[in-house]
């Protein structure tokens, strides 16, 4: 073993954590992909086929752009993820365990690759590339009684390093509030989807927020270098990273970004460290198959070559975050929240049964599962599940109109049609019997209530209207691309 460390137990824990995240990803795809990017989705799959090439963005759905194929792929991914989580080929006798594990993890990676490359805007998140990069490395970890190739474990640490260090650099270069330690004054209120503890975290004392921001810089900029240090320093760095990501999990909804980072941090441990922390015994594994070790060596050479561009980007003053440099997302660059939104805006979508809009028109609101539409609704806990439409609504609300959001008009059309797929993405449909005659979208500024305000009203939010995102419009009008300019009854 390289450095005299074993990684059989590390692999055991890592593989199950990764399988759980794959399971979440495929469940989200099974429920959300077709209404978002399927044949009749908000961004139809035809759009991907027409504007991309298979070489640039390879996907099974490029060859078979069908909802039936999409559904079959998603549920196959669910089944394979559950197999990897609960049983898998890990206990097969030699020489079957390793080849079976390679096939299983390769199938998961190929299937999820198809969703990411065809998912367009709704799959344009950094944690998608990170899951694919991590999932590709998992193919070469082996299984059964065979030892895990140490080189692959170190490549997982390299993913973790780029994730954390890239995030730290882009913050330091980005918004001034990261440098003057005031970032956390805004973060909990303006993050994409607050959770039940976000309100409380926002109201922590200023000195705590300063300490949080300083601690963020330490964990993201200094600690990652210890991932490659001897034990126990690598494990100490892993514990610091897990604690940091755990706090983010407790105070926000960032899909599986934090959970996947925690899974990656398992690679910083050794079997001896894990065995001391967990009530389990560690078997004496057989040496990894020579063929697997050779594949790991080829993999390492390839990762080093593909790391040149991500490292150049990471060290550049013009650093960009969450970017893939190859069609298969093999080695990527990461980063998050280089700038902090100081004000929170939300789009509130409403409908009415009235055929004519008047000053007395009664508007009913569509509730989205992760959005703080109702000021009295406690922010929900969603992560590590991913609500893709809700995230895009957060981005869309940053602008005063949907001009750069081609899917938003389609969303309104679907609501006016009463489309079942689209309505499945919504928490509460105020028109359960017949779709509305008109819909509109209103833009609000939201802020947390103070402790005194919440004590008096029970509300979590205060809001004020700051504009009209889309004027009241009917199905005929929105299909014709001419949203009504009427301002009555706004």
Image: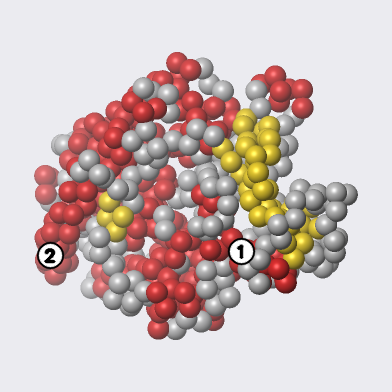
Residue displayed at 24% across by 37% down: 224
Q: Which of the marked residues, 1 or 2, is nearer the chain's N terminus?
A: 2
Q: Which mark is residue 409?
A: 1
Q: How is the image coloured?
A: secondary structure
Q: Left or right: 121 with respect to 281?
A: right
| SS of the residue under disc 2 | helix
Q: Position of residue 19 (x, y in %)?
A: 41, 59
Residue nearer the viewer, 184 or 7: 184
Outermost residue on the right side: it is 360
Marks 1, 2: nearer the viewer: 1
Q: Left or right: 398 with respect to 266?
A: right
Q: Which mark is residue 51?
A: none
Q: Position of residue 432 (x, y in %)?
A: 80, 63
Residue displayed at 85% across by 49% down: 359
Residue 368 visible in image: no
Outermost residue on the bottom side: it is 64
| SS of the residue under disc 1 | helix
Residue nearer the viewer, 88 or 419: 419
Residue nearer the viewer, 156 or 197: 197
Q: Left or right: 454 with respect to 245?
A: right
Q: Position of residue 234 (x, y in %)?
A: 22, 37
Q: Position of residue 458 (x, y in %)?
A: 74, 29
State the residue position of label 2: 298
Residue displayed at 57% across by 71% down: 41
User: Disc 1 and disc 2: Cα gap in Å?
Assistant: 48 Å
Compared with 161, 437 (above or below) is below
Q: Residues within 10 Å of mark 1 (few under 14, many from 20)?
A: some
Residue 203 visible in image: yes
Q: Are marks 1 and 2 in contact (CB under 8 Å)?
A: no
Instruction: Indicate the quadrant where residue 431 lies.
Output: bottom right
Residue nearer the viewer, 288 or 435: 435
Q: Residues within 10 Å of mark 2 (few under 14, many from 20)?
A: few
């Amino acid at each position: 073993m390289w450095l005299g460390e074993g990684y059989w137990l590390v692999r055991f824990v890592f593989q199950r954590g990764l399988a759980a995240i794959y399971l979440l990803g495929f469940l989200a795809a099974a429920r959300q992909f077709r209404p978002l990017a399927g044949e009749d989705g908000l961004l139809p799959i035809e759009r991907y086929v027409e504007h991309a090439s298979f070489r640039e963005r390879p996907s099974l759905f490029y060859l078979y752009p069908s909802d039936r194929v999409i559904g079959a792929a998603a549920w196959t991914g669910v089944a394979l993820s559950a197999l990897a989580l609960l049983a898998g080929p890990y206990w097969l006798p030699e020489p079957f365990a390793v080849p079976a594990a390679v096939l299983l993890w390769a199938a998961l990676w190929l299937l999820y690759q198809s969703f990411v490359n065809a998912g367009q805007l709704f799959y344009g998140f950094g944690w998608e590339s990170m899951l694919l990069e991590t999932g590709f490395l998992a193919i070469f970890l082996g299984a059964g009684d065979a030892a895990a190739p140490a080189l692959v474990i170190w490549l997982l640490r390299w993913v973790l390093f780029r994730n954390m260090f890239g995030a730290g650099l882009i913050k330091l270069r980005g918004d001034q509030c990261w440098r003057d330690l005031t970032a956390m004054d805004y973060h909990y209120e303006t993050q994409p989807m607050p959770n039940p503890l976000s309100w409380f975290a926002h109201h922590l004392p200023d000195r705590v927020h300063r300490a949080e921001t300083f601690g963020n810089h330490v964990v993201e900029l200094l600690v990652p270098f210890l991932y490659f240090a001897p034990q126990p320093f690598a494990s100490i760095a892993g514990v610091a990273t897990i604690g940091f990501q755990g706090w983010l999990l407790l105070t926000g909804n960032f899909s599986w970004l934090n959970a996947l980072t925690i899974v990656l941090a398992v690679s910083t441990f050794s079997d001896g460290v894990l065995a001391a922390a967990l009530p389990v015994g560690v078997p004496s594994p057989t040496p990894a198959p020579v063929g697997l070790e050779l594949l790991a060596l080829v993999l390492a050479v390839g990762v080093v070559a593909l790391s040149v561009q991500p490292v150049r980007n990471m060290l550049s003053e013009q650093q960009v975050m969450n970017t893939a440099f190859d069609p298969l997302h093999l080695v990527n660059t990461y980063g998050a929240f280089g700038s902090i939104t100081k004000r929170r805006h939300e789009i509130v979508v409403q409908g009415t049964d009235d055929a004519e809009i008047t000053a007395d028109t009664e508007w009913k609101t569509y509730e989205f599962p992760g959005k703080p539409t109702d000021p009295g609704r406690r922010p929900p806990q969603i992560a590590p599940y991913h609500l893709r439409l809700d995230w895009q609504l957060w981005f869309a609300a940053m602008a005063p109109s949907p001009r750069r959001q081609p899917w938003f008009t389609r969303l309104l059309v679907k609501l006016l049609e009463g489309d079942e797929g689209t309505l499945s993405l919504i928490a509460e449909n105020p028109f359960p019997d017949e779709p509305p005659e008109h819909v509109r979208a209103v833009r609000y500024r939201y802020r947390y209530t103070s402790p005194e305000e919440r004590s008096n009203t029970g509300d979590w939010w205060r809001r004020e209207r700051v504009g009209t995102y889309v004027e009241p419009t009917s199905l005929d009008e929105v299909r014709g691309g001419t949203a009504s300019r009427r301002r009555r009854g706004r």
